């Protein structure tokens, strides 16, 4: 028993020594592969640098080039170490384990495929401000596995690509401008035509409002203590541009209605009592 074990260890040691030159050659091939991959990345970057490809597509092309070089280099290194290994046998071996690997790395493959599709599609570019699953932020970086989104409060959120691909994504900055709105209430004794004209005049005077795209002023509903107007205008598409324009529009409307003597009422509450409420002297006597 002991002699058999010693013989096996000697055979393994002899085989390892015999394969040392192959390991050395494979190591050299891997080093050369790393160098070639670096050059291939630079060449690909120069080629696509002269085109108008989106940054996400450039990243995808560079990743595919680098991945292709590494797969070829590793394949050659494995054939050097195992001379009996052929491309056909390797593909067959991968095919046998493909199902098990697929189940084990399902999420990784899902994010990888979603990353490729996100990079290919035209919408949602780097620099866009998006909203997805209640999260609002700026797209900073897209990889084959994840997307980095800088929230408006400054934190970076790393989002798996499958989430962005399977759920609705609202792109706030797809265009330079988008429509904003605010609701303004006036008292019931107000001439609505006059109020609408005052609002139109002051809102169109705000620099951030794009008058060419139109301004909507709709008498929207009879509220508890006011008649409400819905005011809609076009301004910058970024969240900050929207906040700044809304701030100036609200200030302008308030100032304009005040100057015109038009009341913006507080909510009125009327209390009714089933029984008579004691007042004054009568209340004192009851106490």
Image (spheres, rainbow, N blue to C red):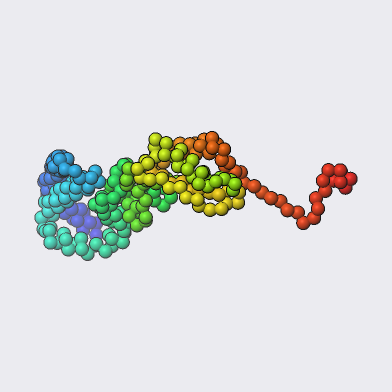
Asked if residue 216 shows in the view, the reply is yes
Note whether residue 142 is visible: no
Q: From the viewer's perspective, is 145 left or right of 34?
A: right
Quarter holding the N terminus is bottom left
In this rendering, the answer to whether 35 lies above or below 168 is above
- Viewer-closest of 106 and 277: 277
Q: Quadrant of residue 87?
A: bottom left
Q: Is 96 on the left-hand or right-hand side of 104?
A: left
Q: Which of the two residues, 261 or 232, is positioned nearer the viewer here?
A: 261
Q: Quadrant of residue 7?
A: bottom left
Foreground pick, 232 / 87: 232
In which quadrant will I find the C terminus? Answer: top right
Q: What residue sits 37% from the left and 55% below the top?
A: 168
Where residue 126 sits in the image (x, y, percent)? 29, 43
Which image quarter: residue 107?
bottom left
**Nearest to the observer: residue 286 or residue 149:** 286
Q: Residue furthest right?
A: 285
The residue sitting at 32% across, 55% down in the picture is 165
Residue 46 lies, in percent from the top left, at: 14, 39
- Left or right: residue 231 versus residue 79 is right
Going 12% across and 45% down the picture, which residue do you hit? Answer: 29
Residue sitting at x 45%, y 42%: 200
Spot occupied by residue 128 in the image (x, y as percentages of width and height):
32, 44
């Amino acid at each position: 028993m002991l002699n058999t074990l010693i013989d096996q260890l000697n055979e393994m040691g002899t085989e390892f020594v015999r394969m040392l030159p192959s390991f050395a050659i494979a190591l050299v091939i891997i080093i050369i592969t790393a160098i070639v991959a670096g050059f291939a990345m630079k060449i690909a970057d120069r080629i696509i640098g002269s085109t108008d490809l989106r940054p996400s597509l450039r990243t995808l092309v560079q990743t595919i080039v680098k991945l292709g070089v590494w797969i070829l280099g590793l394949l050659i290194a494995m054939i050097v170490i195992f001379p009996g290994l052929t491309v056909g046998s390797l593909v067959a071996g991968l095919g046998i384990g493909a199902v098990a690997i697929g189940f084990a790395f399902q999420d990784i493959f899902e994010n990888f495929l979603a990353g490729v599709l996100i990079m290919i599609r035209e919408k949602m570019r780097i620099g866009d401000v998006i909203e997805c699953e209640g999260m609002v932020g700026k797209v900073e970086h897209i990889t084959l596995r994840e997307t980095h989104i800088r929230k408006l409060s400054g934190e970076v959120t790393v989002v798996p690509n499958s989430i962005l691909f399977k759920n609705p994504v609202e792109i706030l900055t797809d265009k330079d401008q988008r429509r904003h709105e605010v609701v303004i209430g006036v008292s019931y004794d107000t001439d609505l035509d006059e109020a609408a004209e005052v609002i139109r005049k002051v809102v169109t005077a705000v620099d951030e409002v794009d008058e060419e795209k139109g301004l909507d002023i709709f008498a929207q509903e009879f509220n508890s203590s006011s008649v409400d107007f819905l005011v809609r205008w076009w301004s910058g598409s970024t969240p900050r541009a929207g906040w700044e324009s809304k701030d100036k529009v609200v200030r302008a409307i308030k100032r304009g209605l005040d100057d015109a003597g038009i009341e913006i009422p507080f909510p009125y509450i009327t209390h009714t009592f089933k029984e008579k409420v004691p007042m004054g002297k009568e209340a004192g006597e009851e106490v």
